[in-house]
Amino acid sequence: MEIDRVRKIRAVSSVAVIVLLLLIATGCAATLIIASRAAGAAVRGSTIKQAFARLALLSTATLGLTLILLVWWAARLLSFLLRPTTRHGPTPYVDAWAVAGKRFKLDDEEAAEEDDDEPQPAEDGPSP
């Protein structure tokens, strides 16, 4: 069914987003480790140490935001996949022409014009 196909496509795209967020988190964690080690090895009070400390702070903030998004997206995916699908029975047959005929109303002017358009029977009797 079309619904099942949409569910599969949505699940695959969600997994792709989760993998991308995991890659970003891994990159931020690696940058955080490298920057903190470089800041610890730098001379105290130097601009290099400050730059590495700022880079470590930025990596920490980005890593935190990425982990929040990762947890939110994973919870959303699981709730979507675990939600039961409801199957409804077939739609009952409706005669659309009959319903439209009941709803259709002519204005008084239009009704008079339609009456005038109809051929009138001859009152003299049958013609030869």
Image: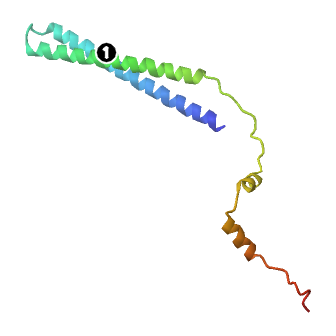
Task: Decide: few, some or many residues near mark 1? Use Cα within 10 Å; few <14, some 14-19, many ≥20.
Answer: some
Could you tell whether 28 is left or right of 92 in the image?
left
Relative to 14, does residue 93 appear above or below in the rendering? below
Relative to 115, does residue 65 appear above or below in the rendering? above
Q: Quadrant of the C terminus?
A: bottom right
Q: What residue is disc 1 on?
A: 29
Q: Quadrant of the N terminus?
A: top right
Residue 100 % position (x, y): 72, 54
Residue 96 % position (x, y): 74, 52
Residue at the spot x=54%, y=20% of the render? Answer: 78
To which quarter of the image does residue 85 belong? top right
Amino acid type at circle 1 is Ala
Could you tell whether 52 is left or right of 1 in the image?
left
Closer to us: 9 or 119: 119
Closer to us: 96 or 33: 96
Residue at the spot x=73%, y=76% of the render? Answer: 117
